Image (cartoon, coloured by chain):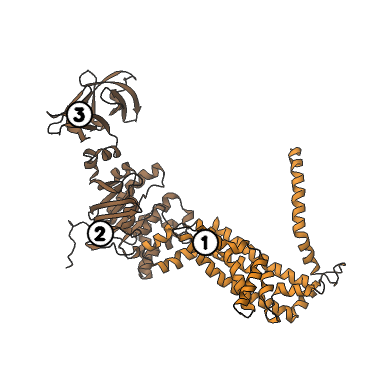
Amino acid sequence: MSSAAGARLPGRIVLFCVFGFLYLPIAVLVLLSFNEAGLPTTWSGFSTKWYVALAGNSEILGAAWNTLVVAVAATLISTVLGTLLAIGMETRRRKSTGLEALAFAPMVIPDIVLAVALLTFFSRLNLTLGLHTIILSHVIFDLAFVCSIVRARLKHFDYSIVEASRDLGASGWTTFWRVTFPVLLPAIIAGALLAFTLSVDEFIIAFFTAGAGRSSITLPIQIYSMIRFGITPEINALATIVMGVSALALLISQWVNKEQMS
Amino acid sequence: MNQEPTAQEPILRIDGLSKSFGPVRAVDNVSLDIQRNEFFALLGPSGCGKTTLLRMLAGFETPGSGRILLDGTDIAPLSPEKRPLNLMFQSYALFPHMTIRKNLSYGLEMERLAKTEINHRVDEIMAVTDLTPFAERKPEQLSGGQKQRVALARSLIKRPKVLLLDEPLGALDKKLRERMQLELKRLQHEVGITFIIVTHDQEEALVMADRMAILKDGRLLQCGAPEEIYEHPADRFVANFIGVMNFISGVVTPNGSFEADGLSVPMPGAAAGPATLAIRPESIAVSMNGGGIAGSLVDAAYHGLDRVLHVKIAACETPLQVRVPAHTSADLGIGSPIHLGIDPDRCRLFPD
C-alpha cells in the first residue's frame, strides 16, 4: 500500500508543478490588483482603490464599452451563422471534406496571419477601419467555434424527432422552432458564450483591424498601450476583471453543454 | 363525385407503388388493399422494402411511381403533416425536452384545438395507456415499455384514419414483447383504427395480424390471413420464412406421384417434372409399429408441450423436423429406427 502511494507521489509533484506554473502568475496578478501600494515589490495591505480608480478612468471605460459592443455584435452574428452552417453541414446528404476544412480553418490559422490578411483585405476594399471591421473579423473565428460546438451536438441528434414532429402535423418552420432549436439550444448557448469569451480578450486581430484613433480601442489594446508606461496596479485590476468575465462565460458555457449531454 | 365510403371499400389502396434508391429497387410495383379496422402486417427479412413502403405511406419518401389512395383520395403528393395517418417510430422519437403531457398534446396543438379539448383528450389517452402517473416526467425518466406506450399514445391521440407502426416492439425484451402483442391487438379493437405494422418477426405477425403481406427484395410475394399463408404458402421463400418447413427434393411422375428415394406421395393433377415437396413438422405422423417411410432419430428437442424430432431419411440430406406430443416419444433413444407417415393433403408442391 505504501509503495502504491509512493509511486503516486512523483506524479502528484509533477501535477502540482504544472498547475503552479499555469496559475501562480495569474494568482499573483489578482493579488497585486488588491495591493494598497503602487509597487509590485511590497504588500502594504488590502485595498480596492485601483478598482475605484478604474471606474473613474474614462479612457478605460470607453475601451470597455467598445469591447462589449464588439463582443456582443460578433457573438450574435456568429451564433446565428454558425448554427445555420452546422445544421446545413450535418443535414446535407453528401458530406464534403472540403467544406469541413473551410469551416474548421479559422480555428487553426494563426491569429497573426488572419490579422494581416484581414487588414490587407479591408484596405483593398477601401473600408474605413473601426469597430465594424473588428466585429467582422471576430465573426470569422467565432463562427468556426460556434459551428464546431453545434455540430458536435448534431452528431448525437436523433433526426427521427424531426420526422415525428412533421408526422404530428407541424410544418418545417414550426418543427424547427419547437423541436430542433430547443434541443440544440444548450449547444448554441455554449457556442455563443465561448464566442463571447474569445471576442472579449482577443488582441492581435483587433489591434490590426481597429484602425487609428481612440474610438475603436478595445480593452486588450488599451491594456497593451498602458503597459508601455509600466505595469500599474490599475492594469492588474483591469486584467482581473477581464479574466473574471471570460472565466465566468466559459464556466457557464461548459455547464450548459454538460447539463444537456448527460 | 364524392361518395360516402362503404364498409366494403378498402380504407387504403396501394396501387403499383415503386421506389428506387440508385440502382436498387427498394419497392417494386407493390399493390395492396387494406380494409377498414384491419390489423395488417408487412412482413419480410431486413432489406425487403417494408420500411420504405411504410415511410412512403407516412410521406417521408417520395414514391417513384404509383398511387396511395386513402378513402379514395391520392395522398402521395401530400407532405407528411397533411396526411390523416400517423407513424409510430421504431426509436419512439419522443421529444426529449418535453414532458409526457407535452409530447402527447403536441399533435393536437398543431390542429389548433381549444385548450380544454386538448387537456381532455390527453387525460383520456393517458388513462387508456396507463400513463397518468408519468404526465410530468421527461422521456429519459421512463423505461422502454413506458416510452413505447407514450409513442403509441402520441400517434393515437390524433385519431388517424390509419396508424403505421414501424417495428413497434423491436426494442422490448421477449416477455414484454409477448404481452404487448396482445395489448396492441386489444387496443386496436378498442380504438377502432386501422393498424399497419412493419415487422421482421413472423411469429409476431402471425399472432397479431388479421392479414399480412410478405415482401422480399421489394416485391410482394403473398398477401392473406395468417392461416392461409401458413397453410398455403405461395412459394418456397414464403414457406420457409413463415414457421418451420421441411423440404424434400424429388420428381413428379407423369401419373401424378411425387417420388424421392424410398418415398412416394400421391399428388394427383401435379405437373410432371422435378419438384420440391414442403411439409410442416406437425403434419408428419410417427408410426411406432412399422410401415411408412423408414428413418432414424438423429436428435430430439424437448419443448415442454411437444418434442421436435430430427429424423434422417434416405430422400433428404437434412434431417426432417417432426413435431410430436412430448409424452408419446419419451422412450425414443438417439439412433433408434423410426417410421414416418406423410399426409398428401397437408403437403405443398413447388415445381423446381
| Residue occupied by mark 2 | B67
Q: Residue at x 31, y 22 (%)?
A: B297
Kindly indicate which chain is depicted in brown in the rendered structure.
B
Q: CA distance from mark 1 to mark 2?
A: 39 Å
Give the distance between the C-alpha atoms of the residues marked 3 and 2, in whole angstroms.
Answer: 43 Å
Residues marked 1 and 2, same chain: no
Task: Categorize mark 3 by other alpha carbons within 10 Å: few (<14), some (14-19), many (20+).
Answer: many
User: Can I make out residue A192 in this image?
Assistant: no
Chain letter belonging to callout 3: B
Identity of the amino acid at label 3?
Val
Cα–Cα gap, marks 3 and 1: 64 Å
Which residue position holds label 1?
Answer: A99
Q: Residues within 10 Å of mark 2 (few under 14, many from 20)?
A: many
In the picture, which chain is orange?
A
Q: State left or right for residue B189 relative to residue B151.
A: left
Residue A219 circle label:
none
Residue on which disc 3 sits = B251
Q: In which quarter of the view is residue B315 placed?
A: top left
Please provide percent x and percent y for residue B200.
34, 45
The quarter in which the N terminus of chain B is drawn is bottom left
Task: Identify residue type, mark 2.
Answer: Arg
CB under 8 Å between discs 3 and 2:
no
Look at the numbered disc 1 and give the secondary structure of its residue.
helix
